[in-house]
Image (cartoon, rainbow, N blue to C red):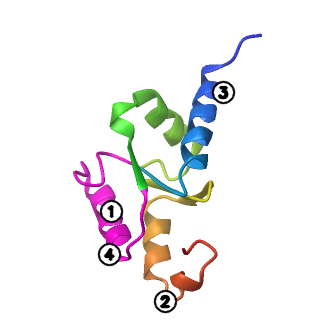
Amino acid sequence: MVISRSSLLHTRLVDIVSSNKTVLLMKGTPTFPLCGLSAHVCFWMKKHNLSFKGIDVLQDPELHIFLRELHSPKTMPYLYINGKFIGGYDEIKQFFESSNYQNSVLAY
């Protein structure tokens, strides 16, 4: 039985998001973001005291490409909460700008 590269990457992604309540797949790290969008999301997460695991996709080019093929939008960062894909930058921004995000099923 041959396991495809896509299947291996999907399994790796599932492992990452299932072993952490909140995961931000980003360029850089939470303490040193390497793009403006990742920096904004890290700022919002920290401002709202939301703990998260940051994963630097630049350290894993195969995963980075896989994520871009898997999701729309094609740009990082991507946020997962409780194993569910929340979205890219625009969706994350809407989440934090919503006046009732604390009552959301995504809130802590």
Tell me which residue sits at (53%, 59%) in the image.
87
Query: What SS does tag 4 mark?
Result: helix
Compare marks 3 and 1 and give the one earlier in the sequence. 3
Quadrant where the image shows the N terminus: top right
Compare marks 3 and 2 and give the one earlier in the sequence. 3
> Which residue is label 2 attached to?
99
Q: Nearer the viewer, residue 67 or 18?
A: 18
Query: What SS does tag 2 mark?
Result: loop
Question: Mark 2 Cα within 10 Å, few/some/many (few <14, many 20+)?
Answer: few
Q: Position of residue 70 (x, y in %)?
A: 58, 42
> Which residue is label 1 attached to?
42
Disc 3 and disc 2: Cα gap in Å?
39 Å
Disc 2 and disc 1: Cα gap in Å?
19 Å
Disc 3 and disc 1: Cα gap in Å?
29 Å
> Which residue is label 3 attached to?
7
Disc 4 and disc 3: Cα gap in Å?
36 Å
The kind of residue on which mark 1 rests is: Cys
Range shown magenta:
26-52
Disc 2 and disc 4: Cα gap in Å?
15 Å
